[in-house]
Image (cartoon, rainbow, N blue to C red):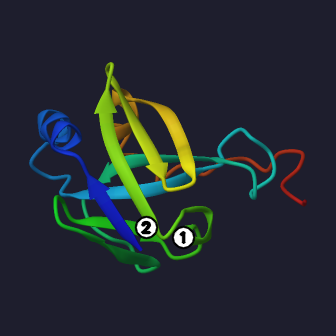
Amino acid sequence: MKLTVTETALEKIKTLQDEKHHYLVLYYDTEGIGCKVNGIPTVRLAEEPRAKDVEIESDAIPAIIDAHQEVFFADEVKLDFSNNVFRLSSKEGYLNALIPQTHLTQTDFREKKTEPSRGDEC
């Protein structure tokens, strides 16, 4: 898997990034959606990889993804920043065209323990 980060996106990431959070995480957010196969591709910052994370080829910033979530992303993904939002796309089109800046700074997303909801069994 390869991640291309535009100069504009990288500049914005650097303004949001603190000294502890060195990794950009491609993340398939399923919280509050119900079924674990329904979700929204997004990005976050993280301090370090977890055991189930794999590195993604990226020349701009160290990037990782949960090995189980990689299936939800294209082989080549681009992260851009325009009109105050991040945009995640592939050759096939947008994966998520409206990623708020605040998503990157929600660095506790990996520790959240969500309650099972209807649809988790699908």
Where is mark 1, residue-wise?
70
Instruction: Work out whether 105 lies above or below 116.
Output: above
**53 or 82, nearer to the observer:** 82
Hey, what amino acid is under mark 2?
Ile
**Residue 24's spot in the image, x, y percent?**
29, 56
**22 or 58, nearer to the observer:** 58
User: Residue at position x 65%, y 43% from top?
Assistant: 31
Where is mark 2, residue-wise?
65
Location of residue 84 by image quarter: top left
User: Residue at position x 38%, y 73% from top?
Assistant: 50
**Residue 32's spot in the image, x, y percent?**
71, 38
Hey, what amino acid is under mark 1?
Glu
**Residue 18's spot in the image, x, y percent?**
13, 42
Location of residue 15 by image quarter: top left
Counting residues from the N terminus, which is met first, the one under dot 2 or under dot 1? Answer: 2
User: Residue at position x 74%, y 41% from top?
Assistant: 33
**Residue 37's spot in the image, x, y percent?**
75, 58
Badge 2 vs badge 1, beta-carbon distance below 8 Å = yes
**42 or 7, nearer to the observer:** 7
User: Residue at position x 51%, y 76% from top?
Assistant: 67
